[in-house]
Amino acid sequence: MTTRISKLFLLFLFITASLLAYTQTEKKTITLEDIFKNRKFSSKAVSGIQSMKDGDHYCQLKKDSLNVYEYATGKLTRTIVTSKQLIPADDTVAISMSSFEFCEDETKMLFAEDEEPIYRRSSKADYYVYDLKTGKLFPLSKNGKQRLATFSPDGTKVAFVRDNNIFINDLSDCIQHPASCIETQITFDGKINEIINGATDWVYEEEFEFSKAFCWSPDGNTLAFYRFDERNVKEYQLTYYGDLYPEQYKYKYPKAGEDNSIVEVFFYDLKNKKTTQVDIGKETDIYIPRIKWTEDPKTLALYRMNRHQNKLELMLADAGSGITKVIYTEENKYYIEINDHCHFLKGNTQFLITSEKDGYRHIYLYDISGKLIHQITKGNWEVNDMIGVDEKKALIYYTSTESSPLEKDVYSIGLDGRDKVRLSANPGTNSAEFSRNFAWYIGRWSDINTPPYIAVYNSFGKEIRVLQDNAKLRGTMKDHQFSKARFFTFKTADGIDLNGWMVKPPDFDSTKKYPVLFTIYGGPGSQTVINSWGTVSSWNQLWAQHGIIVVSVDNRGTGGRGEEFKKSTYLQLGKYETMDQIEAAKYLGTLSYVDKNRIGMWGWSFGGYLTLSCLTKGVDYFSFGIAVAPVTNWKYYDNIYTERFMRTPRENNEGYESNSPVNHATELKGKLLLICGMSDDNVHPQNSYDMVTALVAANKSFESQFYPNSNHGIYTGKNTTFHLYNRMTDFILKNL
């Protein structure tokens, strides 16, 4: 009997302990500290992988050493360099290894030390050269920080930009005698806020998405470079606080309808030290959004685009004379987007390019004279990216939305358009980074509820080995009651199907009514409704745990569904996007478990703009909103972006004025929190200040939060990010 009682007692203890553990697990909830300070829900990545020249090995930085591994086995084959080898002669501390570049034959390396950010894609640093043969480390230059340092193809020289001029450093003597490095200046008219050589102006960097404005010819004998004359571009001024007298920073920012930089392209011949201007035509109010050498070291390819961005020409320029000829022309009734999908095949007799000319972005093959050979991909779906071309096998690797606008898969296809093969197996978002010989690739996969799974694959799509599966994070998500996101589709009053996702509270009860929080972006070509990790943030999950349904909807103008859907907002940026978000709120209000009187919205940048538009034009459907770093009048935004979708204010004044939230401030009824960084070089705080002025004039109550010295990302300063999200959290809890 005693034994029986003991067994029952032990069983009781076991059940109690199990229930206690279960209860404790169930009670784990998400906190702001977990998200933004402890980074508890951040996925692990596999970063810093570079394919070696042989294609069967890759290098990766591991702690204090840069190592080489086999793709096939993961075996460590050698260590290239350690931090102990990267201590400058006049120092006792090693330079940073986080940013590095090899020369083509992998005998030298460039390292960037003490990087200083300039804008979104630009920085300057103290560059160091490390010679693997001799083991010597030496500074690239001692005359001030450099930008965009790049090896020549043969690794004997490095070109870089300093103080808006281009320099070339000959490494021949530096290796043996670092003090005798020969630094040759090839441009001399560079001046801040006037002339830029070899780097882009602000608007090219932001909207054409590149900052290095020079490139070496394949034989290393010629350097092609841009020159920006921005003297006629108007300045914008930002104020930085913290000292007795605030610092005023001025830079050139061309707003919609205003003057751009005059752009020119030049060749510099290293042998005869001669500079030749490229003939890009007499019209100066144009864009040159890309330059790229063909396989011929005497021939440079250039994109020339008109100001309206609806006519694109591909030109070839002779490096000796600068004479050009147009080999490809494309015109569009809306606009043409710029990408890096132009690829010249070996032999320089053919090239690949992508176009939306049939309504969806697809790959085309042309001969060098510009004659169409054939369209390679076809269908009512889009090519997202042209990853690479294996010319030995005559295969193109690319990603596309063929299975769904919400998905992205990796494919291969022949140059003849045949033998298409889907390499990625799992539904969701897939990408591939191929080795130099195209024998292997690093594949990344995730879906809306699953963090990234990263593995090595062979060229046929067979998984070889796992690099990161984020299993620990999946367990953490389960412990903290992450809700599953679900996709949905509804039809608007105009008969348009829109896609969305929804996250319900973990203890969702269909007999109850819940408030709804929209999280949106909605800008041209973007997508927030995709089957990918990060689409639903841990902050969204926090709201679900507070009993709020979180929703995102992709309005007209977003990507993945072809040209007509994406470009239907042309000349009326914000109009149809707002209508569609209002339609989404109406639809959700018909659901039995939604409290239609408690629907809110928040967004950043274009999402902030759309939030303001919905709170004014959709006052009967949105009860509150948070607008972070919003555009409030498209006249205030940069011209490359804005005119692409709206043309100039002089041509389309009605489109600008009718879609500016400033002009609808009197309609505001719901609660509003307006947030901006006061040193935002992208969406200027002027936008928020003018919105404040309009709201005050209309006698509207609202809340605001301004962050001194913070840019568009609002992360500059101690505790800024946490404070921002804590502020928004308090506002949402108070108003939903």
Image: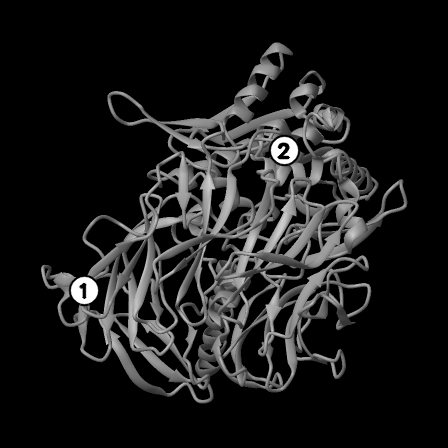
Expressed as whole percent of the image width and height from the top left, the position of residue 584 reads 78, 41
Q: Which residue is at 76% across, 40% downward?
A: 569
Query: Relative to 222, does residue 250 appear above or below in the rendering?
Result: above
Q: Which residue is at 81% across, 44% downward?
A: 591
Expressed as whole percent of the image width and height from the top left, the position of residue 77 reads 33, 87
Image quarter for residue 274?
Answer: bottom left
Query: Relative to 556, does residue 446 appear above or below in the rendering?
Result: below
Which numbered tag is attached to residue 138? Answer: 1
Query: Taking the image as drawn, is residue 267 in sight?
Result: yes
Which numbered tag is attached to residue 533? Answer: none
Would you call the spot at circle 1 few (<14 residues within 10 Å), some (14-19), or many (20 or more)?
many
Mark 2 lies on a secondary structure that is helix
Nearer the observer, 94 or 285: 285
Which quarter of the rendered picture does the C terminus lie within? Answer: top right
Q: Do the residues labelled 2 and 1 touch (CB within 8 Å)?
A: no
Disc 2 versus disc 1: nearer the observer: 1
Q: Which residue is at 68% across, 31% downward?
A: 648
Mark 1 lies on a secondary structure that is strand
Q: Which residue is at 52% across, 24% downward?
A: 686
Nearer the observer, 312 or 459: 312
**Marks 2 and 1, how far apart at CA:** 49 Å
Q: Who comes first in sequence, dot 2 or dot 1?
A: 1
Would you call the spot at circle 2 few (<14 residues within 10 Å), some (14-19), or many (20 or more)?
many
Query: Taking the image as drawn, is residue 548 in sight?
Result: no
Q: Name the residue under label 2.
A: 609
**Three-letter residue code for mark 1:** Phe
